[in-house]
Amino acid sequence: MTSSNLISILALAAAAATPASARDLGFIVTDFAPAIHQGKGDCPNGLAGTLRENYFATLAPAERARLGAPENEKELQKRWQGYAFGPNNTNVCANPEAFPDRPTQKMIEGPVAYGLDLDGGAAECAHAEFASPDGRRGIDNQAYRAMGCTLNYRGVDGKAGDIVRGSKMWLASGEHAMVILVKGVDDPRNDDAVEVVFASTDDRPIVDSQQNFVTGASYTVSANAAHRNLLKGRIRNGVLTTDPTDMRLRRAFGHGGPRGAKAEWEIGRAQLRLVFTANGALAGVLGGYQTPRNVIISTIAGGFGAAVVASIDCAAEYNTMLKLADGYKDPSTGRCTRVSTGLDIAAVPAFVFDRAPGESAP
Amino acid sequence: MRLLAVLAGVVAAFVPFAAIPKTEESVAVAGMRRLSESQYRNAIADIFGPDIEVAGRFEPIVRPHHQLLAAGAAQATISPAGLEQFDAIARRIAAQVFDEKRRAAYLRCKPGNATRADSSCARKTLAPIARYVLRRPPSKEDLARYVGLADVAAEKSGSFYKGLELSLAAMLLSPQFLYVVDVDEPDPATPGARRLDAYSRAARLSFFLWNTTPNEALLDAAARGDLDDPAAFRAVAEKMVASPRFEKGVRAFFSDMLLFEKFEEIAKDPVIYPRFNPAVAAAMPEQMLRTITDELVARDGDYRALFTTRRTFMTRALGTIYAAPVRSAYGWEPYEIAAMDDRAGLVGQAGFLALYSHSGRSSPTLRGRAVREVLLCQPVPNPPGNVNFTAVQDVHNRSFPTARDRLKAHATDPSCAGCHSITDPIGLALERFDGAGVARDRENGALINVRAPFGEGEIVGAAGLGKALAADPALPECVAHRAFEYATGLSADAAGARAAKAADSFARAGYRIRSLFLDVATSSDAYRVVASPTASPAAGAGR
């Protein structure tokens, strides 16, 4: 047995405040990012356009040819960056809803995606469904369909984009740190009723020199009760699933301030499907519904810099998600307001101290 | 400022022993010990307040082979570079003491003109400070020199306060501050013999029991002659070991005895030991000290129980090493190691296990040697220079998966076998902990065997080693000898039979550390001057 395995098992048996016959299993979340299927045929038409490319596409052929000449690069740069801005000092990333007439972007065309069957086939707004890589049908993940061909998601190497790397970094730095506490587990293979606390933690994770999360560290659930989500679930054949529950989690960017205070993961009707792995860890997916704005909140937080420096066309992303929205239908408009989503979750054993709402810090 | 610097240097060299009374051959300097960094810091905090920042690098005191740093302090000189550092530190302290914010707390009068010298006011202000800094009332000559320096500097700088600042900086650079000076005098109880004088006793008591400079009460007791009366002297020492400040003295002693300066250099390969990080490294010695002071001071426990106890303290950083849940997000909390766990006592703590390991592998030899030398006072010879370490260093050799296998192969050389037979069995009992102190039961896939011979019997694992150590008479004898050496600054050889007496009284007191320290602190043996006194350099120094 390696020391890490020994620690995993000890962590599994930790059982802070555990009933005599059951155990509480604690975890620190190591991955919490959009689940991206990297299939070869997912984006047959190429990646979604950058703001520069999308601006270029709006030009008449002759003008496109003129501005494409190297000697006119300066003019082109000025004009595509100007395309980021709208009336009243708005810009496509800080105010993507202010550009409803901007075109949508290239979407996922492949049949496979990670995620969950959120609507059980009874869609609020009609949409095509995916199959999961392990063969489950009816997967709802319209956020992935809309965003999956962006460079931010797909990455230059076809493995993982900045959205994944950035999320991992924020988890490790403590800005988004999260814990999972599966309470009252009689049998980690099969248990008809467990409670799951999925919460932010105010503690900075303990990571090694390569930014890997160290197992067996201790964490306390966040003092902010809004970021402690209590889910009802069960374990069948080593797979933990939970009932739909609205979830909120801290999602700060940078070290506090107004930007940090405003951001949250806000996932409606969230469900978990997590597998207990052989080394005592958890891995799987969180499905639910996000507003288009919540899906791209990190880019929105970047403001016009995300548009004119990173050349992200937030308006195209936003409009694509609105078009594909499949949940939370607005009765007044008859249109859905949120997109289904699938988030990749992984967690390693940790000692997690729960904190009931209103309870002070230990 | 350059002029002031020159003046300070001149004065520092000018007044090294001026405060020591010079009455023919009645007194002499019997010994000097350089202040440790912690003693210096504690002294400044106690004299001027904890808000005074002591910034700078301290020249290290060299530990003599198999001895305490306290013994090294008795031999420590200060190099020119080290003196420059002390000078810089002293100037920063003096500048803070007499800055606008703080000076009112130290001034005993208002200068007639703040831009000129004022001898009278300088004298009134510097005299009480000098009493604390020099640990005895300044002589008239001393005071005259410090006042004279303040006057000259005030006139040159155009600031009375700058003059005081310079004078204080010179005081802090004086050997009488940087060294604990043992001054002896004829012992009236034993004609022909000599003993430490009252102020030297006060300093020894204070640095030994509290790791800091004598306070007002101790200096007053010395002035009244209380410290010359055995009963009154013991009463003073009893109060000191009953004080919460006694813990600082115990911490300083064990930091010295357990070679904690090695923690400043501890390094682990982050790939091999991902749980080891700076927070863990910083917490390791503190965990050991908290365990020691909790068992020996707060609980007044038997010293031997320190090696079997399962009580300790934990931080979240350390919790990852121990696989321990830690509720407190910040700071320390009590923790009890489970009875089923092999980890028990001081030698089972991560700090001991990691300190006596290599950066990338555990070392039964280093751990065993540390137990022998540090805890049992049984020096082990150094290996010869031509040893082939290949067998023990190759941790990936499948033929020798465990440290036991590798050491067995290495010790087939008869020239190595002798020493390894006295170190390795002890260390092999600790092999279920890797080089960072994390529990393991296999190495390279092979089960680790932690059975080993010890004395006439056999030990099993860390808990077994702890029990065996607790039963070994050499364990309490060693700490008693070390306490005597620590209090006196004597080497083990020089302490000799006098330290053995301390060991006897330690046993009679049920191995209570408070009793040991009290007995050593008040033992007439500790204050008897055996060696020929050094001639006081005061007569001609600097002239």
Image (cartoon, coloured by chain):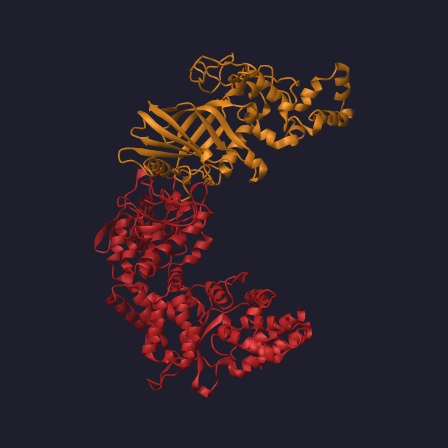
Q: Quadrant of the C terminus of chain B?
A: bottom right
Q: How many marks?
A: 0
The reply, left or right, for residue B297 in relation to residue B92 is: left
Can residue A30 be seen here? The reply is yes
Indicate whether B219 appears above or below B307. Answer: below
Q: Is residue A353 above or below residue A99?
A: below
| As drawn, B426 above or below B189 | above
Residue A12: x and y in percent read 34, 35
Report which colour depicts chain B.
red
Q: Which residue is at the far left?
A: B456
Report the side of A102 relative to B65 (left or right).
right
Q: Quadrant of the N terminus of chain B?
A: bottom right
Task: Give the percent coordinates (x, y) of residue A219.
Answer: 42, 40
> Does residue A52 appear left or right of residue B242 in this picture?
right
User: Which residue is rendered at x = 55% and y = 83% of the image?
Assistant: B141
Q: Colour of chain A?
A: orange
Camera-side residue of B332 and A168 = B332
Q: Residue at x 46, y 81 (%)?
A: B535
Identify the residue at horizontal 32%, vertical 65% (top origin): B514
- Residue A164 higher or lower than B350, as above or below: above
Q: Nearer the viewer, residue A241 or B485?
A: A241
Where does the image place residue A306, in percent across and percent down from the top left? 63, 30
- Residue at the far front: name it: A332
Q: Is residue B413 visible?
A: no
Residue occupying image coordinates x 27% and y 62%: B474
> Which quadrant would residue A263 be assigned to in this image?
top right
Which sits in the foreground, B228 or A330?
Answer: A330
Q: Measuring from the top left, give residue A223's x and y in whole percent.
A: 45, 39
